[in-house]
Image (spheres, coloured by chain):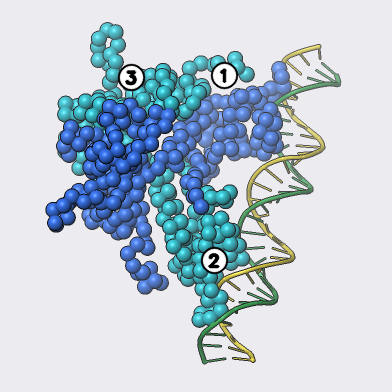
Chain colours: A cyan, B blue, C yellow, D green
Amino acid sequence: MTLEKGYRTELSVDGITIDRRDIEMLEAIDRHGSMHAAADALGRSYARLQQRIVELEAAVGDLTERRRGGKGGGGTELTETALELRRRFERHQTELDGVARATESVFAGTVRERTGTLGTVETAAGPVVALVPAGATTVQIGVRSDAVVLADPEESPERGVTSFRNQFTGTVSSIDSSDGVARVTLDLERVDEPPDGSKSVADVELETLVTQESADSLGITVGKTLRASFKATAARATPTGDAPSADDDASS
Amino acid sequence: MTLEKGYRTELSVDGITIDRRDIEMLEAIDRHGSMHAAADALGRSYARLQQRIVELEAAVGDLTERRRGGKGGGGTELTETALELRRRFERHQTELDGVARATESVFAGTVRERTGTLGTVETAAGPVVALVPAGATTVQIGVRSDAVVLADPEESPERGVTSFRNQFTGTVSSIDSSDGVARVTLDLERVDEPPDGSKSVADVELETLVTQESADSLGITVGKTLRASFKATAARATPTGDAPSADDDASS
DNA sequence: CACCGTTGTTTCCATGCAGATACCACGCCG
DNA sequence: CGGCGTGGTATCTGCATGGAAACAACGGTG
């Protein structure tokens, strides 16, 4: 069972939501110059398509200039508003695309402190500062692989001169290169060593996505020790009510 | 007209897609201990709900342990698979949530070079290395505000020792603090100075999201000069086919 | 003028989804 | 044994979506 992350892109305004189908409709009108031709090309009925245009325009303003009669019987052209709408949608789609495609590393932990929307979460790898929703105590933290920055542990800046709130060191356990992008997996060390003073592996993996160029210039190989940093605002916690014990049953 | 970004979270497997409604259904079953009670609480029909369970289980494996007869007439409990499914969904939702909420900075530009999925894009602020879809020439680049790292321009590391591929300097034009998080807007300088040798403002704004703690330790104030860095893998380009000219018409 | 291909509008029908209802099967409990 | 509250299944109905088809309005073109 391979579960795939999905999403449906939407832009909403004034109670109505614009989805991919609407954007494809606008694109087809743009390409063919008339609503009839667009409906034809998309294999959908002219009547519904035209009604949808009217509906959208009531919400977002003029999207089309429609002429009837005259040369060629008339035609429809998109306004700048419609073009901007398309750009907005595509950009939004690309963002979501990135989220769905980028793998993420997961830290389970419990919330220790809270200041506003931020919180400190105690995890197997040490404390992590993340965006924590109100009322959450046991959480899992998701860090997108494209939000983690790698650096040489000796040359990387001290905490304070950058806006990184989370820095961990770990050793490279695997590298997977393709298309100029390398997916590097680190095994993290615990930040606060256990009482016995030994350095221990936290059994937490952190995946990062870097350009091949970066991987080369950092000299990344399996076994190398690296410093991985990510911002608190790029780490997002979601509550889990079922991790620790069966206090669910007690409450119900 | 205020357009709002939206999305609908989904997990798909084996041709069927699991949406928020399904997750709410699982949650209700978990809370009430029976499908009847869950259907009741959700205000939906038992018949449909039960059919949906069967449908989902055919795709992802057992989600429930259902007993009929016996004490209390029987009941339904979720399996570990179902709980994991819920966690996966909520995490995915949180990720998308971040995208929809985080503002992004937009760079318009044209693609100069390509290596695999990466490309160099010439923008008003200078070259940007980003993920570029195949076949794109004129693009807009979106950078999420939570992916940009700020640093003191003098102390920040040289290119090469980190996996940052994009670094710009700019001056702070506005700060907006709330809930422990500060939204900092930079006016970027051009990276490659124009022929006349003068430093010029590129008229490109870059928005970043940092913790208040970071803003304080960096001493961020309006007018201060900062170095902003972001990874190529966090910058995503989307094609725009309408910026340069009307070669659309020629092809049709 | 008639013709043509558009835009506009209405009516009807097919499809799918979901609630409503009814009925059966099950198994402990009184 | 019958009651009861479950799970399991089938059928009907209502509703929303969207296509099919028909027709009017428009305005250049011949």
Circles 2 and 1 on the same chain: yes
Disc 2 marks which residue? A39
Chain letter for the residue marked with disc 2 in the picture: A
Give the SS element for disc 3.
strand
Q: Which residue is mark 3?
A: A126
Q: Are marks 3 and 2 in contact (CB under 8 Å)?
A: no
Q: Label 2 vs label 1: CA separation? A: 53 Å
Specify the label residue A248 is tagged with: 1
Q: Is mark 2 in CB contact (under 8 Å) with mark 1?
A: no
Residue at 54% across / 39% down in the picture?
Answer: B18
Residue A113 appears at what percent x and percent y? 41, 19
The answer to which quarter of the image holds residue B250 is: bottom left
- Is there any visible trace of residue B186 in the rendered image? yes
Q: Earlier in the sequence, mark 2 or mark 1?
A: 2
Q: Earlier in the sequence, mark 3 or mark 2?
A: 2
Q: Is residue B214 left or right of residue B53?
A: left
Q: Pointer 1: residues within 10 angstroms few (<14), some, or many (20+)?
A: few
Q: What secondary structure is marked by label 2?
A: helix
